[in-house]
Amino acid sequence: MSTAKSPRKAQRELIDGSRNRSSILLRRVFWLLGVIAAVFLSAAGAVGVRYASDLGSLRRIAFQRTVSHGGRWIPASRTARPFIRALIATEDATFYTNWGVSFEGTLRALWVDLRTGQFTQGGSTLTQQLIRDLLLTPRKTLTRKFTGSVLSLYATAWYPKQEILSMFINEVYLGDGAYGIQAASERYFGLPASRLNLAEGSLLAGLPQAPSAFDPLVHLSSAKARQREVLSRMVTTGMISPRQALAAYRAPLPLR
């Protein structure tokens, strides 16, 4: 009596075996993801407990940093709109919609860091930069990046976006000894931050990346090159037209 399997039965057993293997693989993937999520939540909870007091005092810390360096506090709502728009277009185009972290930028930076073995990539949002400046150190390590990302998520849940923006523009270093947009506007142009036009605002918005290298009083050509980048990003994000960008780039700067 023949024991050979029919082609249909053999095919069915092959399909069933493939399904079983896929099911096992999926269970293992879900188990691994569950473990990773549990570890992340545990670590994030520990970070939250460790920095809870600092997060609650973030505005006071930002204010003290500004005042200690001779700066003067100005709310984002009273700061010239061209500067605010230029800053957001350049540093964090999704500021008003993100959770304080650019997951795409963070993952991209992490991938490059792991491939090169050097922690050199950025990918930080305005919120992450604020947290780094006020609560952490500029040293680039995986631990610091993880802590900064978690704290940025907490800060976004804790503070309105406009409050985070106000803290950032007042504590950020903008070169030539100027901390905060009010001090920088007065230092470079002799103007209050509420009166900056597009040409002046776009120049200052490019400074956070490298305040000393782009100091317009010392390296005007570099500052202008950076201003061109800022204006280009404003065009890309639809904030201004190419004609407005060109006019702002060509406009005279009343540098002191």
Image: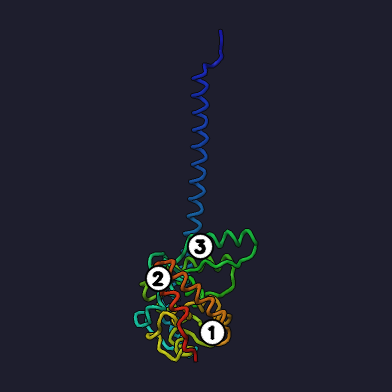
Residue bearing mark 1: 216
**Can I make out residue 111 in this image?**
yes
Residue at the image point whose x is 56% and y is 61% from the top: 110
Q: Which percent across, then down, holds residue 197?
A: 40, 82
Residue at the image point whose x is 52% and y is 66% from the top: 123
Precedes in sequence: disc 1 or disc 2: 1
Q: Amino acid at mark 2?
A: Ser
Q: CA distance from mark 3 to mark 2?
A: 26 Å
The answer to whether residue 62 is above or below residue 8 is: below
Q: Quadrant of the N terminus?
A: top right
* Of the two numbered discs 1 and 2 in the rendering, the one whose residue sits closer to the viewer: 2
- Mark 2, secondary structure of its residue: loop
The residue closer to the viewer here, 37 or 212, is 212
- Residue 232's disc is none
The answer to whether residue 156 is above or below residue 68 is: above
Q: CA distance from mark 3 to mark 1?
A: 29 Å
- Mark 3, secondary structure of its residue: helix
The image quadrant of residue 4 is: top right
Question: On the picture, is 190 further left or further right than 141?
Answer: left
- Residue 241's disc is 2
* Of the two numbered discs 3 and 1 in the rendering, the one whose residue sits closer to the viewer: 1
The answer to whether residue 95 is above or below residue 23 is: below
Residue bearing mark 3: 105
CA neighbours of label 1 inside 10 A, class few (<14), some (14 to 19), many (20+): many
Residue at the image point whose x is 37% and y is 85% from the top: 194
Precedes in sequence: disc 3 or disc 1: 3
Precedes in sequence: disc 3 or disc 2: 3
The residue closer to the viewer here, 40 or 59, is 59
Residue extending farthest to the right is 117
Q: CA distance from mark 1 to mark 2?
A: 25 Å
Q: Which percent across, then down, holds residue 46?
A: 48, 65
